[in-house]
Image (cartoon, coloured by chain):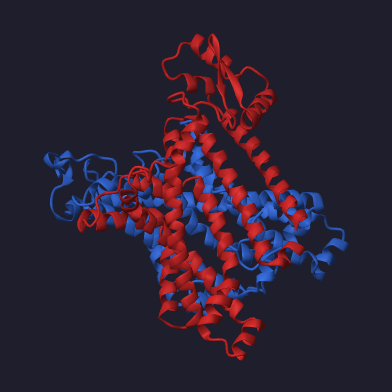
Amino acid sequence: MTGFVLKKLAGALLVLLALSLAVYALFYLAPGDPARLACGERCTPQQVAQVRDQLGLNESVFAQYGHFLQGLVAGRDYSAGTGTLHCDAPCLGFSYQNDRPVTELLLDRLPATFSLALGALVLWLVIGVGTGLLSALRRGGLTERALTVLTLAGTGTPVFILGLLLLMLVCAYLQWLPFPTYVPFTEDPEQWAWNLLLPWVTLGFFESAKYARLTRSSALETLAEDHIRTFRAYGVGERAVVTRHALRGALPPVIALSAVDLGTMMGGAVLTESLFGIPGLGKTLIDGVRVVDLPVVTGVVLVTGVAVVLAGALADLLYAVADRRVALT
Amino acid sequence: MTTAPTAAAPAAGTTTPAAGTARQVLRRLRHRPSAVLAGAVLALLVLLAAAAPLVAHLTGQDPNAFHDDLVDSARGGVPLGPFGGASADHWLGVEPGTGRDLLTRLLYGARISLLVALGATAVQVAVGLAAGLAAGLGNRLADTFISRLTEVMLALPMLILAIALTAVVPAGFPRPLLLILVIGLLGWGGTARVVRAQTLTLRSLDFVAAARLAGNGPLRIARRELLPSLAAPVITYAAILLPANIVVEASLSFLGVGVKPPTPSWGQMLSTAQTWFRADPMYVLLPAGLLFTTVLAFTVLGEAVRTALDPRESSRLRVGRTRGGARSRKERTP
């Protein structure tokens, strides 16, 4: 088991290293002059040259990448005119827009993304697992038909269409809710929840179709196994069979997929955030792209990469813990 | 990296039986009402999109011409008249704010949507085929490297990378081509995985061994022996990719990093539609409905093609009859 964990972690680390290289290559060697972008439109050539010097863009490519990595792991210093500007690890550089450290900027935006993802997670687990389990138990029933519709709608609808229609119906026409504006949890938990309700429903419903299908197939598979038949033969009640045994066997893939999806969302559920104006990482990315703020864009991509890779490793581990056969292979 | 199953991946490691001739496949498709309906809807859409300049000419409307006289400037630019300003000249009304003709803009938007989705799918399939074949036929080192890369490509969230990539490309680069390349080069992982699995299975079969013993090189084997057998799974997978790519294009346009105005696109319309919920609901419903219908039709048709190519598999969308869903857990984990 330890060997399995170490192997997974080493693999994850390798992927992250490759990702940092790819990100670095793409964003700093791409056409366009980072120094000019950082300096702004109205800079004189002298000022651009100065910025280029400050950012270390005169060094060789390898030295630059080395500094980039060093900044990530141990922090780095930028020479800023007379003094030096220190950037703590993990250093992602400074935003071209407002010269704030990107790490700080992203940490500021993380709670919003986290709030959105967490609520959506609860919803898709409840709706998805519930529907999936029901349809597994009553094959050919109403839930199964509902699941078919859910799947069709879920695969066919871009998430922002559902969000738009919900906004239009609930906020503009029925006026049950005001148009959402993000309120931080620390400020007012009640308003936080009310304002996030629609984004949660949108994202949660959108994802739940996938989970319903997964739960269903996984539950059917578990229910068909020998030990369940034995439990039934011994007279264990149907409710206990389902909740205590079938569900336990059916959940590992659901948990693993949830870990992966959560990881992806940590990079921002861009569409949902953008539609509902939630100031999360995804919105930061879009805003950064609009003004070509390269450090912010690279920062979000790297954070996403780390989240996805870690979530993937976590999912593998959860799987191995839940099903020992996996760890042995 | 992750072993979590994805609904979109066909069962790896199984060989597809001879799919039959194209005529047989077409006959099976014709016997499915849903496939016929979806096909008809798509045929109409493609026809209209292709004929967009003709429609513009016939109705006498330019998709980019402003009509200040058709919107109520006192109310912020709401189209005059019911149903978003629909009239004999502007069949589906006009765009709020600018008064541009909605029908032609929607049709030109369809061109962008279909062009980008088809192009991106072609790139994905081409790269995926090359990578999958190289992994399946190459030595162990090549296989490990490509498989690892494929896993990473599959795990990374495509939308975020695509958005980020649009930032570093110079503004002069043609946007539709950029979208095709970005979506295509980020989304080949699934095809590569399917092709590799299929290649590994095929490689051990007698006819491939015979070809190898006859002295054929890997390239020739790939082309002559493997490609015909790979056609069915690859087409099936491409049919899943196509609607997904439409959604990605619409999403990128929605986020403002797709095609640049004044070129119309559905996603772009939907992002501006947010301000017109009450004043002009048609402006929300028309692009949303069109996008939804298109994606749904492609999905349904893709499912039908899949079952027509491989009759053993029942539809994934009809949950009740799924057989693939009951695959054993051992199969899903490596």
x and y percentages locating residue A169 in the rendered image: 25, 58
**Quadrant (top left/top right/bottom left/bottom right) for the N terminus of chain B:** bottom right
x and y percentages locating residue A67 in the rendered image: 65, 25
Vertical order, A159 against A254 (above or below): above
Vertical order, A207 against B89 (above or below): below
The chain that appears red in the image is A
The chain that appears blue in the image is B
Vertical order, B74 against A213 (above or below): above
Q: Quadrant of residue A187?
A: top left
x and y percentages locating residue A127 in the rendered image: 43, 67
Vertical order, A66 against A182 (above or below): above
Q: Identify which residue is drawn at 53% across, 35% down.
A: A299
The total number of labels drawn is 0
Regarding residue B169, the answer to whether it shows in the image is no
**Quadrant (top left/top right/bottom left/bottom right) for the C terminus of chain B:** bottom right
Q: Quadrant of residue A73?
A: top right
For the residue pair B233 and B139, the one nearer the viewer reads as B139
For the residue pair A112 and B69, the one nearer the viewer reads as A112
User: A309 left or right of B168?
Assistant: right
User: A98 left or right of A81?
Assistant: left
Regarding residue B232, the answer to whether it shows in the image is yes
User: B146 left or right of A254?
Assistant: right
x and y percentages locating residue B8 in the rendered image: 56, 63
